[in-house]
Image (spheres, rainbow, N blue to C red):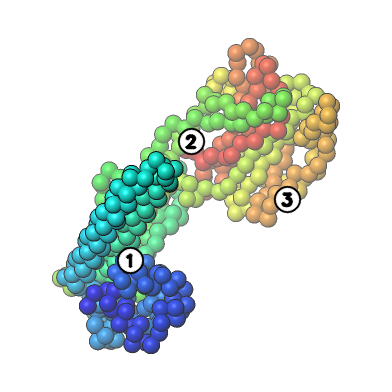
Amino acid sequence: MKLNERLFELRRKAGLSQEELADKVGVSRQAVGKWENGISVPELDKLMALSEFYQMSIGELLGVESQEAATAEPSTETPAAVFDTGELEELLRELGEQQKRTELRTKKQRKTLWCVLGAAAAAIVVVAVVFGGRMADLNRQILGLNNLIIFTQHSLNESIASMRGTIAGILEEQNSLFSDWDSETVAFDPESGEVTVRLFAQPKSVTEDLRLDFIVTDEEGRELQAEAIRQGTGFAAEIRLPQSARELPLEAFFAEKYGIMSSVSSQVEAMEPLNGEFTLAAVLTEGDTAVREKLGTFYAGLSELAGDFLAAWYADPTAEEGAAGLLAVYADAGRAIVSAELATFVNGVEWARTSLDMSRDEDWVTEFDMPEKYAAPRKDGNTVASVPGKLTASEAYRLFVRELAPDVPESREGETVSVLLELTDDQNITYAALILITTAWDHPQNTFADMTPILK
């Protein structure tokens, strides 16, 4: 039975009008009429609503699954597909034929329409002298009708294509041997440049002698295999994946003396680990039978472990270049910082390096009273005044504040002086931020930069 005829028959058996069914499914009466006339097919969410209302599976509603198959007891063996491939092909052929019939009917209607409009146009030509103004209006109506026909046909094609993709997705999910899988980056080794990833998969059917092996394929086609250990009814394993690195130019934003935000690319570079894209497959082995299935793709890299940091530098607008400033670091509360260094570069060449004491826990705060000389400048008419305030961190962050001199040398014309902050956490992950850039023509103030995880 055709899909539109089946939908009409189900509504008739339920004793419902189009208005009543539309109200229960949550669509318009016109939509129900288009389904039953074969003009369009229900979208997936509407199919699910119809399936729930009639208490039928989607397969039974589409006519590709019998009532007995829908109510049969689930097998303890590896589940077979609920949809048969031949039945799916028959359904798709039926939808395609329905589309062709609709297109043919649309062409006939369009031909009839053009014949009628042609006759009307011929009659209008006879009286064109009197009704010339109406001709232009009629042409616009013809164009509008033609565009409406094209739009309707395009919408129908899209609906059928979406229906095909949805059914294919349902088939793929029901044919899969697994009900769930996941991946999680759990550790990083800075010496080897490898990340440790924990993999998990949940088969739909588990027996006592069932074994599972994970196979990870990188972007270059290399495969790594790990034997999984059973955890309840699922399987888990940890695998170390290599990471590549590239040169990362660091960039900082700074405020010019007229309050215009600008950016300068420093010559300071560091090694950035690339986050790799990997394909995960699983091999289920039971006795002498082994079945391999692709589970999907996942990403693994340093950024999966990196915390969230922000560095800020506040300078006294009235002080000379190189004078002490206020360094503030907003750090994710879940990370412990074990060391910190402040390095100064002139034209990208290191000029000085200072180690900061980060061992005192009492120095991490959530609120800090900002000295007036470091406050953000505010323009009030033609005058600029410093406004005292507070540095605050949200509940998820801690705030580390130091008043120090960045050892900035006296800059000359054409030189770029930058200050780089490097923090290392308890997992040996180093974060870097260019927090200060100064040139001979500008004095920096209120400079912010995001911390970027790097390889050293």
Q: For the point 52% across and 24% down, which residue is it?
A: 267
Q: Name which quarter of the figure residue 253 lies in.
A: top right
Q: For the point 45% across and 37% down, which residue is it?
A: 272
Up-down: is 70 above or below 357?
Answer: below
Between the C-alphas of marks 3 and 1, the distance is 59 Å
**Residue 126 placement (x, y as % from top left):** 33, 45
Image quarter of the N terminus: bottom left
Amino acid type at image mark 2: Lys
The answer, for residue 140, to whether it is visible in the render is no
Task: Choose mark 2 or mark 3, whichever is in front.
Answer: 3
Structural crowding at the residue carrying mark 3, measured as other residues with C-alpha within 10 Å and reported as few (<14), some (14–19) or many (≥20):
some
Q: Nearer the viewer, residue 375 or 50?
A: 50
Label 2 residue SS: loop
**Residue 123 placement (x, y as % from top left):** 32, 49
Task: Choose mark 3 or mark 1, whichever is in front.
Answer: 1
Mark 1 touches mark 2? (CB < 8 Å): no
Up-down: is 80 above or below 54?
Answer: above
Residue labelled with disc 2: 456
Label 1 residue SS: loop
Q: Nearer the viewer, residue 396 or 225?
A: 396
Residue labelled with disc 1: 40
**Residue 103 placement (x, y as % from top left):** 25, 59
| First-in-chain label (2 vs 3) | 3
Amino acid type at image mark 1: Ser
Mark 3 touches mark 1? (CB < 8 Å): no
Q: Name which quarter of the figure residue 410 lies in.
A: top right
Q: Nearer the viewer, residue 297 or 146?
A: 146
